[in-house]
Image (cartoon, rainbow, N blue to C red):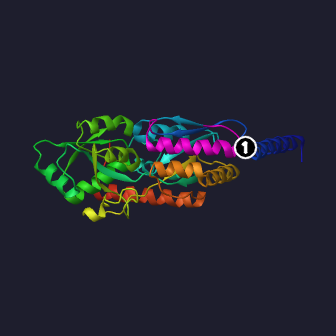
Amino acid sequence: MNRLHTGLFAGALALWTTVLAAQASYPIKPIRLIVPTPAGGPSDAAARALAKGLTAGLGQEVLVENRPGGNTGIGAGAVLHAAADGYTLLFALASNAGLPHLSKASPYKSLGEFSPVAAIGGNTQCLVVPSSVPARTLAEFATYAKASAQALMRGSNNVSEDMVAGQITGALGFKLERVPYKGAPQLLPDLLEGRLQAAVLPVGASAPHVRSGRLVMLGCSMAERIAALPTVPTLGESGVAAAPLVTAHFVLGPPRLPAEIIERLAAAVRQTALTAEFKQEMDRLLIVGVARSPAETRELMSQAEAQYLQYVRDTGASID
């Protein structure tokens, strides 16, 4: 081996040794967990509960950074182009799987471009209306919407809400005009005051206002009724035959995140999910689900994407 080749080999070996050492000692500095929704909503609360547990388990602070906008695309895009070193992660919603199929502005073509780390429970989506709307069932609301002289306004802040709303309106034969918001905290004041006539929202965001009597929950996209709200029917029970929405929060890394870092993070998520404090917060948010492995997470991502793709093919839906 000549001197040039010897030098190149030595340099490559030194670089590889450095990379392996960095992975073995990971993490050595704070980690950013980017949440693509505004602060204050149920996904943000779940991310903060997870970040607290990961901080304890990893021995480095995990900092939640809210990057809302672009129908969750802005935050996702920031992680897509981040360094694959494990210090920038995405707390994705299942709706992130639908964004590439519903918007040409999506920064990624498939959620599969990201590195799957783990998944925890997601938000059950429910159709809610202000108590001032004269409807207490989904059938009554459909009749009211069809008879209205003006289009009813529906607030929306992500594509999973749009898909559930599309399933409802398509099955029951009425229309709602979409009004976009950055997140549930921004949408709720207009809904509570009746400036919006409907919204599909995470059950954790709307349940407190249902209990207070200011909102009425007409149906939820789940296979079974929610234990904490046993009188609220599923959409299937109300005549909407579409499959229940895939619900999950995904912890994702940039493309090509090293396997050693993925497993370190996945183990910390599993450990956090078993703590009483984390379970208590998920119960408060009405988020149901267990922590998933990287392989299980990839499969769940694929299921969510297939569901959105089929919906777009069937309806031609778009949010552009």
Q: Residues within 10 Å of mark 1 (few under 14, many from 20)?
A: some
Q: Nearer the viewer, residue 91 or 258?
A: 91
* Residue 24 x %, y %: 77, 47
Numbered-mark total: 1
Tell me the residue at 69%/50% (across/down): 264
Q: Residue at x 50, y 46 (%)?
A: 92
Q: Image quarter for residue 158?
A: top left
Which residue occupies the foreground of this view, 109 or 61? 61
Q: Which residue is mark 1?
A: 26
Residue 112: image location, x then y, percent: 52, 53
Whole-percent x and y of residue 99?
Answer: 41, 47
Q: Which amino acid type corresponds to the residue marked 1 in the rendered image?
A: Tyr
Residue that extends furthest to the front in the rendered view of this protein? 212
User: In this rendering, does residue 81 appear at all?
Assistant: no
* Image position of 183 (left or right of 128): right
Corner quadrant of residue 313? bottom left
Kindly report the secondary structure that dominates the magenta region of the rendered protein. Answer: helix
The quarter in which the C terminus is drawn is top left
Q: Nearer the viewer, residue 123 or 255?
A: 123
> Which one is in front, 91 or 102?
91
Q: Say which residue appears at 69% left-offset and 44% top-offset.
A: 58
In this picture, which residue range is highlighted in magenta?
37-62
Where 306 sits versus 83, above or below?
A: below
- Viewer can see residue 155: yes
Looking at the image, residue 246 sits to the left or right of residue 82; the answer is left
Estimate the x, y position of residue 133 in percent, counting from the top left.
19, 45
Q: Is residue 87 magenta?
A: no
